[in-house]
Amino acid sequence: MAGLRTPILVLALTAIAYGCFVYSRLSNRNWDWSYFVTAGNEFVNPEAVRTSLYIWPNAGYDGQFYYRLALNPLSSDREAYGIILDNPAYRQQRILYPALAWAVTLGHVRFVPAALVLINLVALCALAWFAASLAQSSGRSPLWGLALALYPGFLLALSRDLTEILAAALLLGALWCLRRNWASAAAIALTLAVLARETAGFVVAMIALTYALDRWRRRTPSFPAYVFVLPGAVAAAWQVFLYYRWQAVPLLSGQDKIRLPLAALWQFLSTLGSAPDDLKLLWSIELYLLALMLVLGLILVWDSSARPYEKLAWLGYTMLGLSFSGTIWVEDWGFMRILIDWYVLGVVVLLGARWRDTGPLFAVTSATGALWVGLVSRLA
């Protein structure tokens, strides 16, 4: 048990930090858990919803669709319970988060808003423990796990009932299991991760590529093929099921997110000066954190003890991030959220750096913590 004390401490600190944020937000909103749903009157009919739901006079945000799916995860209706799914195939492919909320509430509608928040809180605590344990297994203090647990993108996702937290926790848990040669547990975690958010499939693909390269080089892979075959097969089957249900390919149903590398990012940077002063400062600090992770990652990835699939996935996400379109590089609700997997893998790379100087980790952790505190005051 002695070896678990510090990872548990990181878990506790994470629970306290995010718990205080949730407490503050609820106390400022008359203890209304549905405020996190961020439902808007463009997709929600106040007269038709089945329980009290705070509704904004605008389009709302993505959490309203996961709330709707949490009322009936396998719904085949575009409109039900007073809520319209804007893009049914795209939303329902991320089924795990709303399905868990439905399961833990036993279908009781009035408990769903609280369940969505609490599931994300539990996932954050699990992610913190995995991060601290990975740091410890890399020969570093588990407290460096806070560099990952306090990533500001998680705060954004928590505040609007979004899917990134659960997906990231499962993804990191899978990597943790693979390092302990728990192949079955890793396969299950990866399968759940791709059902939480389809972007986890990129890591599954890199694991498959690593396996294929080992076979090609006549090396014995460090994990069995079912680690990537199971999540890949389940993800493909779910995509096919949703295609026949909605007559749309879920993976291709979202907004166009890819452009030429750096095109949209450069455009965003060029217009940053015209943003309101408070947003200009916030976005500049967030971009500084991302740039710091990018530079340190590129320097240290080649000498890191991170697994080959972890390195490949981070490098691949780097190229994707630089190629995202203006639908992502428009505000922090776009780029800070979609880069969560990239950041998670980046911290894994830094934790495994054979360069024992803690300067890079300290720089990332201090920037992350300062930005996290700044965002709390804005979101609470």
Image (tube, rainbow, N blue to C red):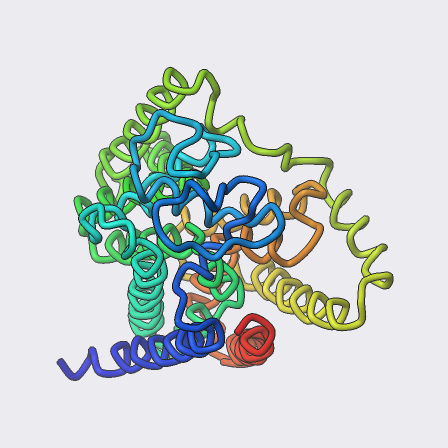
Q: Residue at x 35, y 25 (%)?
A: 76
Left or right placement of residue 102 versus residue 217 in this view: left
Q: Is residue 250 above or below residue 281?
A: above
Percent x, y of residue 303: 49, 61
Place of residue 143 in the rendered image (x, y in percent of width and height, measured from the top left):
38, 80
Query: Which quadrant of the figure has residue 277?
Result: bottom right
Count the marks: how many?
0
- Asked whether residue 144 appears in the rendered view, the answer is no
Q: Is residue 250 visible?
A: yes
Q: Is residue 322 above or below residue 208?
A: below
| Residue situated in front as seen by the camera: 267 or 202 | 267
26, 332: nearer the viewer: 26
Residue shown at the point (42%, 50%) measured from the top left: 163
The residue nearer to you, when weighing 357 against 182, is 182
Can you give x and y, in whole percent of width and height, for residue 348 in the image? 43, 62
Residue beneath the point at 77% across and 43% down:
263
Which residue is at the far front? 47
Q: Residue at x 48, y 29 (%)?
A: 251
Foreground residue, 262 or 330?
330
Picture layout, residue 358 above or below residue 227: below
Q: Position of residue 353 (x, y in %)?
A: 46, 67
Q: Quadrant of the N terminus?
A: bottom left
* 375 sits to left or right of 305: right
